[in-house]
Image (tube, rainbow, N blue to C red):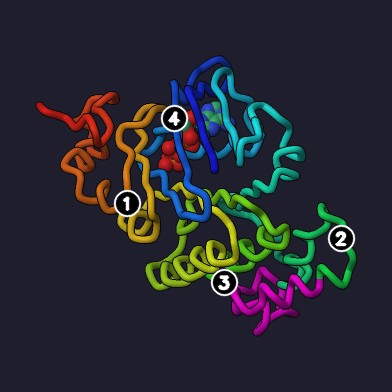
Amino acid sequence: MITIEGLWAGYGGIDILRGMDLHVEEAGITCIVGPNGAGKSTVLKAMSGILKPRRGRITVGGVDITGRPPEAILREGVVQVPQRHGLFSRLTVRQNVLMGAYVIRRRRKHIEARYDELATLFPPLAERPDVAAGALSGGQRRMVEFARAMMLEPRVVLLDEPTLGLDPRSLAVIRESTLAMNRGGATVLMVEQNVRFGLSLAHEATVMSAGTVALAGTAEEIGSHPALMDLFFGAATTSSGTLSRPRTD
Ligand SMILES: Nc1ncnc2c1ncn2[C@@H]1O[C@H](COP(=O)(O)OP(=O)(O)OP(=O)(O)O)[C@@H](O)[C@H]1O
């Protein structure tokens, strides 16, 4: 579904991604983990068009989206849920979610039907439609952000650290909401700081280190890989190999 090949990208002349490769299966949940500064969020920025890659290729469903503007990538069905501050706190839950639809400019009837559909997946839409988003808990706000992204009926949802800043009780909410998006038809690519959480939810996983792929495989394989801890605590080199080429030192 998504293929990234030899991607180079960065900021102000400094390369952060250095030959990044990634393959994301259609209809699955794929998680990118890795130490701080590895370039995880930069991959999502390159995919959503916020950042123009210097080299390499990104395709979604066979369509080349490399370096295209964000609106064009959105039209290909790729929607990013930002890391934080995604909602207008004075607007209601309903207003925030409906706002997600303005780019598609479909008939009002269709938009309202879509809201009702999403209200069965994301409880605050049904239970607290007229409450200001600013009055919701962190976990509830996340659900509203997810629902807003789903208004566009995306093929791909990019989630940037969905658990960031949330207390442990909210993790179950994020888990349910991510599964709901996936059940709703979206291929999910998520970047997650909480490795245990990310791997428990994902089917496939990639561990990044210094702008490239250190390990890739099923979430289960990655979770039990002997090099995982080294990659987080700095003992591994940046090119320590994929699962088919494990470290031997
Ligand atoms: N807008 C920017 N301008 C300049 N440098 C940036 C910018 N955004 C990120 N960086 C730098 O790029 C590097 C990778 O950042 P990125 O956010 O992709 O890492 P990450 O793996 O997602 O890290 P974290 O887990 O800490 O969020 C970091 O060194 C960061 O300081």
- Calculate the distance from the C-alpha at mark 4 to the C-alpha at mark 3: 34 Å
Residue appearing at x 70%, y 39% in the figure: 73
Is 38 drawn above or below residue 169 in the view shown? above
Q: Which residue lies most toward the top here? A: 13
Q: Is residue 56 above or below residue 191?
A: above
- Sequence-wise, the earlier of marks 4 and 3 is 4
Which of the labelled discs sits on residue 21, or is there none?
A: 4
| Contact between labelled residues 2 and 3, with CB atoms less than 8 Å apart | no
Q: Is residue 125 magenta?
A: yes
Question: In the image shown, does 170 or 9 lie closer to the viewer?
Answer: 9
First along the sequence among labels 1 and 3: 3
Gap in angstroms between the C-alphas marked 3 and 2: 27 Å
Packing grade of label 2 (10 A; few <14, some 14-19, many >=20) is few
Label 2, on which residue? 106
Ligand 1 is within 8 Å of the C-beta of the residue at disc 3: no
Tell me where the magenta segment starts and ends, as one range: 112-137
Numbered label attached to residue 140: 3
- Tell me: 77 left or right of 16: right
Q: Which mark is residue 219?
A: 1
Q: Examine the rendering and report whether any part of residue 124 can be seen.
A: yes
Sequence-wise first label, 1 or 2 = 2
Query: What is the C-alpha distance between the residues marked 4 and 2?
Result: 36 Å
Magenta highlight on residue 202: no
Is the shortest distance between ligand 1 and the CB of mark 1 under 8 Å?
A: no
Please, what is the three-letter code of the amino acid marked with disc 2? Arg
Tell me the kind of residue under disc 1.
Ala
Compute the Cα span from label 1 to label 2: 38 Å
